Image (tube, helix red, strand yellow):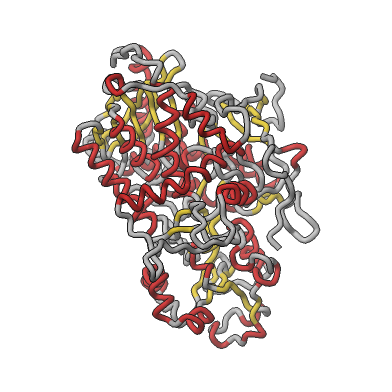
């Protein structure tokens, strides 16, 4: 590690690399790895234990699969039921390279679209495997009874999503995540009934137990009784989702947080590409300062809805139905004729911001700016009929009307970009193992598959791929080294981890300041959105780092956490999560500052083409930024994993 402090903010450490992916042709790597991974015979599986944190698609699928294989599984979620995991909120669909439409899709094309969509900042080997197992996911889910939409003849239907020119997205109206999660949930519940999985609902992981450099368990708090519990195992899997709520306003469930990942990061797990967050273009716009979250409208709506703003700012106050066709700017169709309204999310989001920044936004003013564009279904209703549109999108239209009071069958929807998904997460190798042996990370909690921008309908694909097909095949290579030495609750490392949680809880409750937890969270969110959101500048990021440090110091000096430790205490839950967000937010800004290029949705104003598109610098930044915790009040350490493209040509993206 260099002793030199770079930018006054971080140090650079030794390079990092993935040593688990086999050599050879990319189409054979996954087959080779499955064969090379050591086996665990059925009798030995009963002697091995695994903790899985999170019960969304990745966590529930992994729990069900590991339990059915015969391992002893402990599954944890902070919700009152695994069915309430945030995966339930996904709407539009799940990708798979089955080529049911006969329109030229293939495993290689899904691989290519995903790498290109991620602006060439993802690892080829992991992405190809994801594309390869995608078809298996659909078969698995159909066998579970997931009610995918079907064509008249009974075949599974597909629709298209942003960033692609084929139809590969399987869907269940606008409730795909819910239906897939119910499938994974029933598989998990079957194993709970069989006794292979122990379920701990309303339990939040607050610390990772690391013994002699190896992950061996977690410290969790029972959110009902307040009891701090120790849980030990032979391996730990984090499937705890993303950290979009660092921005306060996002499409995430309000309980979504970074704590499981962040506590592991502080114990030695590298954090990959923390600044890579996704802005979703089709969110119901913010209506005022009273809101605590935002609501997503599925990207599938861009199949039939046309996006536009008035050509003249003076028309923005008018009823959109009174604006004639010649006075409308269908700007995505104009700028990107090849993809039109189905450009990737980052491009659609940035252009919506550009239209509003030009003064052509629509809807009510918030902080003096109209932040909205129209998503209009008049053409689709005229072409297909209202009933056909209702059958495809009815629940989404109903949800929009309940929230806004406007009927989207009669008046165009208003949408605006919002924080949605996080591509950054804990760094993992091809086996999904972090830099801490015995700690595996799946789904949105890891960084591995989406680069700088996730294509729509790929989150559900990755979660189920990791849970059903990847992790069960790779973690066995680690578990085959067992049986492992038994660790007792009196082990010094276990006692220390337990005490760290107890001390942290006591400290939060003892500050007794004057400001609410939410006020700090809102303040952090505003800094992050304005200075580390859709557009960043060096000046803004440096300001953000200073402001976050000041805010964090004030948090630990003046936050007021009500209630007690030994009871249900949602104020305490929030405080712990916001404390971790305050540390993560600084690292995100440092990561964004050090990467002096625009890629995906991460637009550096200093790095753009003549026509305002994102400009990458592959000669300098074609790497994964894997950050190591430097210690309290110490700078983080940057480790670079070079991204080598053997099977896809590295080039500037174009969707025109």
Q: Quadrant of residue 315?
A: bottom right
Instruction: Name the residue at 66% across, 26% down.
Output: 11
Pick whichever, 56 or 367, lies toward us: 56
x and y percentages locating residue 558 in the rendered image: 44, 39
User: Split into 4 quadrants, where in the image is the N terminus?
Assistant: top right
Pick whichever, 568 or 533, lies toward us: 533
x and y percentages locating residue 171 in the rendered image: 42, 60
| Horizontal relation, residue 497 to residue 14: left or right | left
Q: Quadrant of residue 233?
A: top left
| Horizontal relation, residue 92 to residue 160: left or right | left
Image height of 487 relative to 509, above or below: above
Q: Confirm whether residue 594 shows in the render.
A: no
| Horizontal relation, residue 8 to residue 320: left or right | right
Instruction: Name the residue at 52% across, 55% down.
Output: 456
x and y percentages locating residue 437 in the rendered image: 47, 21
x and y percentages locating residue 635 in the rendered image: 61, 27
Q: Quadrant of residue 258?
A: top left
User: Split into 4 quadrants, where in the image is the C terminus?
Assistant: bottom right
Q: Confirm whether residue 161 shows in the render.
A: yes
Image height of 81 relative to 383, above or below: above
Instruction: Name the residue at 36% across, 44% down.
Output: 56
């Amino acid at each position: 590690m260099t002793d030199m402090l770079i930018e006054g903010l971080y140090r650079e450490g030794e390079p990092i690399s993935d040593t688990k992916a086999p050599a050879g042709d990319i189409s054979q790597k996954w087959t080779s790895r499955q064969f090379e991974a050591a086996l665990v015979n059925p009798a030995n599986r009963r002697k091995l234990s695994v903790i899985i944190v999170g019960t969304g698609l990745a966590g529930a699928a992994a729990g069900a699969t590991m339990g059915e294989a015969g391992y002893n599984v402990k599954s944890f979620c902070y919700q009152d039921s695994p069915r309430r995991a945030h995966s339930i909120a996904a709407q539009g669909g799940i990708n798979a390279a089955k080529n049911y439409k006969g329109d030229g899709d293939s495993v290689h094309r899904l691989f290519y679209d995903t790498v290109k969509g991620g602006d060439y900042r993802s690892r080829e080997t992991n992405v190809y495997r994801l594309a390869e197992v995608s078809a298996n996911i659909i078969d698995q889910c159909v066998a579970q009874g997931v009610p995918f939409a079907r064509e008249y003849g009974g075949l599974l239907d597909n629709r298209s999503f942003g960033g692609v020119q084929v139809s590969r997205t399987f869907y269940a109206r606008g409730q795909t995540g819910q239906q897939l999660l119910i499938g994974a949930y029933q598989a998990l519940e079957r194993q709970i009934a069989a006794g292979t999985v122990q379920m701990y609902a309303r339990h939040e992981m607050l610390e990772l137990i690391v013994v002699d450099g190896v992950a061996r368990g977690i410290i969790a708090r029972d959110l009902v009784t307040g009891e701090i519990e120790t849980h030990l195992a032979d391996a730990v899997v984090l499937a705890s989702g993303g950290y979009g709520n660092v921005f306060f306003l996002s499409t995430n469930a309000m309980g979504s947080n970074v704590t499981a990942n962040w506590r592991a990061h502080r114990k030695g797990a590298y954090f990959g590409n923390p600044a890579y967050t996704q802005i979703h273009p089709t969110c119901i716009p913010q209506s005022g300062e009273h809101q605590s979250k935002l609501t997503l409208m599925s990207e599938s709506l861009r199949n039939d809805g046309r996006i536009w703003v008035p050509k003249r700012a003076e028309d923005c106050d008018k009823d959109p139905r009174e604006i004639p066709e010649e006075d409308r700017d269908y700007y995505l169709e104009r700028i990107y004729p090849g993809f039109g309204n189905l450009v990737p999310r980052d491009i659609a989001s940035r252009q919506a911001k550009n239209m509003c920044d030009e003064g052509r936004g629509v809807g009510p003013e918030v902080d003096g700016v109209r932040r909205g564009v129209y998503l209009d279904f008049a053409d689709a209703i005229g072409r297909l009929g209202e009933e056909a549109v209702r059958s495809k999108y009815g629940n989404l239209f109903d949800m929009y009307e309940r929230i806004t009071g406007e009927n989207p069958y009669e008046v165009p929807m208003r949408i605006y970009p919002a924080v949605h998904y996080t591509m950054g997460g804990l760094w993992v190798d091809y086996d999904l193992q972090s830099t801490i042996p015995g700690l595996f990370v799946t789904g949105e909690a890891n960084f591995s598959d989406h680069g700088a921008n996730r294509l729509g309908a790929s989150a559900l694909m990755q979660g189920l791929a990791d849970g059903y097909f990847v992790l069960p095949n790779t973690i066995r290579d680690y578990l085959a080294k067992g049986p492992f030495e038994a660790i007792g609750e009196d082990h010094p490392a276990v006692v220390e981890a337990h005490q760290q949680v107890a001390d942290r809880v006591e400290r939060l409750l003892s500050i007794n300041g004057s400001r609410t937890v939410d006020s700090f969270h809102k303040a952090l969110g505003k800094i992050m959105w304005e200075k580390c959101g859709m557009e960043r500048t060096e000046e803004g990021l440096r300001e953000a780092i200073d402001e976050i440090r000041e805010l964090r110091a004030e948090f630990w000096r003046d936050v007021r956490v009500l209630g007690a430790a030994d009871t249900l205490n949602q104020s305490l839950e929030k405080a712990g999560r916001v404390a971790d967000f305050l540390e993560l937010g600084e690292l995100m800004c440092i990561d964004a500052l050090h990467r002096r290029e625009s890629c995906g949705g991460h637009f550096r104003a200093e790095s753009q083409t003549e026509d305002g598109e994102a400009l990458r610098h592959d000669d300098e930044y074609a790497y994964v930024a894997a950050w190591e915790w430097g210690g309290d009040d110490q700078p983080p350490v940057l480790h670079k994993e070079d991204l080598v493209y053997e099977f896809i040509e590295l080039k500037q993206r174009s969707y025109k």
